[in-house]
Image (cartoon, grey):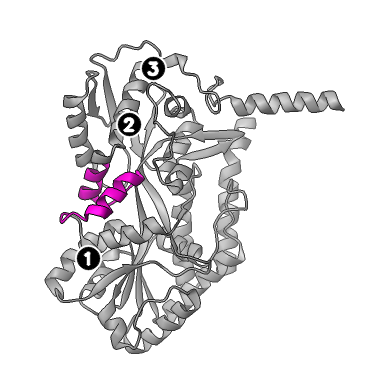
Amino acid sequence: MRRNRLIIFIVITSAVLTSCNGSFGTLIPDFSLYDNLLLNKVRIDVSYMSSSGSEELFRSLAEEFSSSNTYGIEVGFTDSADPDMVITGPSNAAEMLRTNQSIELSPFISNSGWGFDDGRSMFYPAARKQTQYWDLARKVTSIPVSLNASVVLVNTDLLKAAGHERFPANWYVFRHMLKNLSAVYSTAMGIPGGAFPFYSFISARGGSILKVFGFSYDFFNPAVNRTLRYIRNTVEKGIISVEQTEYSVQTGFAFGKIPAVLVSTEGIPPYKKLISMTLPGMNWQPVLLPTKRPGTGTLVNCIQAAAIMNTSPEKQLASWLFIKWLTEDQQQREIARVTFSIPANRSAVQGILNERPASFVPQWLDAVSLIDSGRMDPLPALYDFDQVSELFTETADRILEGGWVWLETFRLDRAVGRDRTQPEKTENN
């Protein structure tokens, strides 16, 4: 019996200490692969796969890095299917590592010559969590570049006119307030369509779409069902308005017809621009969606992460040096200034909040301050999360159209589970 236990212990320990490519890399990184490399005139091709639509900014940053780095590294962008580096979302990065298209990044992160001084501690914990996954051992899929988060924009004039001095931090008071507002205004709150706003409500109500250990999904659970039923009921009563595009919600708020709207932080500047044209005297501010848990918090998403592809060691190292440069304070602040995403680097955020530069929208700065000081609940980083979210959106649409909540979530749970196990069955066959 002891011998069997010893064998099992050795096997598990070997698996934990070994990275996905079979060499030491997760807990004991293999540094030797990148020793004595000559980077003079190395060119890397980057593919931009993020949905945030800021490729031109990253092209500009690539040109700056190419002209200023001391290694002679040249960075270009490509539409080729074989890039050296990819800027994408964490879900896609996890899938690329899972299928051996990209490499696990522990050897770079912990490297005494090339790595970060304090590992990944410079990044927000939520960003770190989204850019890794567990398969016997922790594997770092990518390096976080920027985040966004859910916030509520509130027209304080409309709120006070309806007898509410402030936006509540308690979920039950929040529900009561929305009901009162709907008696005064045609809609108390607007939320855009898509999965992210629904996930935000589920998280605020203390629920999750994942099973306990976070390795798989659980859509057929009481918290998800109750949240979807609550949203549908409030839509039917005219308390909440769910739109397929954010534009109709945006105009309703900007023209002083909707007291509150749920938005992502990247969406705040367009509101500022529209309000300045419609109701420039409006008093409005960001707040966090109330939660059932103690303290304040919101749902965040790493919208841009950098992964290194499984190419030559020289190109991998060159890609790492470009990524490391992108995560420095100056570049992080520039990305935030242009895209109004939140820097993944915490010190860059602190610098922006301390200085409050005029180039940033004041309400965006206030929102980031609330997010920075509260709890950050990250979206899942599972390899198929993007595809699953599309199925969830379709399910939510059917529920809003009158579908049975428990039946729709049950079908979604079954479909997602079937899709996740089908590739394994195919491989075994």
Of the pair 355 and 271, the residue shown nearer to us:
355
Looking at numbered disc 2 in the image, what kind of residue is underneath it?
Lys
Of the pair 94 and 65, the residue shown nearer to us:
65
For the C terminus, the quadrant is: top right
Q: Pointer 2: what residue?
A: 324
For the N terminus, the quadrant is: top right
Q: Quadrant of residue 17?
A: top right
Residue 360 vertical placement versus 102 (above, below): below
SS class of the residue under badge 2?
helix
Looking at numbered disc 3 in the image, what kind of residue is underneath it?
Pro
Is residue 52 highlighted in magenta? no
How many labels, in total?
A: 3
Q: Picture coordinates of residue 11 (x, y %)? A: 70, 25
Residue 329 vertical placement versus 291 (above, below): above
Of the pair 324 and 310, the residue shown nearer to us:
324
Magenta part, dominant SS: helix
Q: Which residues are magenta?
A: 332-359
Q: Residue at x 37, y 22 (%)?
A: 316
Is residue 348 highlighted in magenta? yes
Q: Pointer 1: what residue?
A: 271
Asked if the residue under mark 2 is in contact with the one under mark 3, i.e. CB atoms within 8 Å, the reply is: no
Q: Is residue 248 left or right of residue 405?
A: left
Q: Is residue 83 visible?
A: no
Q: Picture coordinates of residue 264 (x, y %)? A: 33, 59
Q: Residue at x 17, y 31 (%)?
A: 64
Q: Pointer 3: what residue?
A: 313
Looking at numbered disc 1 in the image, what kind of residue is underneath it?
Tyr
Q: Is residue 401 left or right of residue 163?
A: right
Give the CA distance from mark 1 to mark 2: 33 Å
Mark 1 nearby-residue class (10 Å; few <14, some 14–19, many ≥20)? some
Residue 3 vertical placement versus 38 (above, below): below
Q: Residue at x 52, y 39 (%)?
A: 133
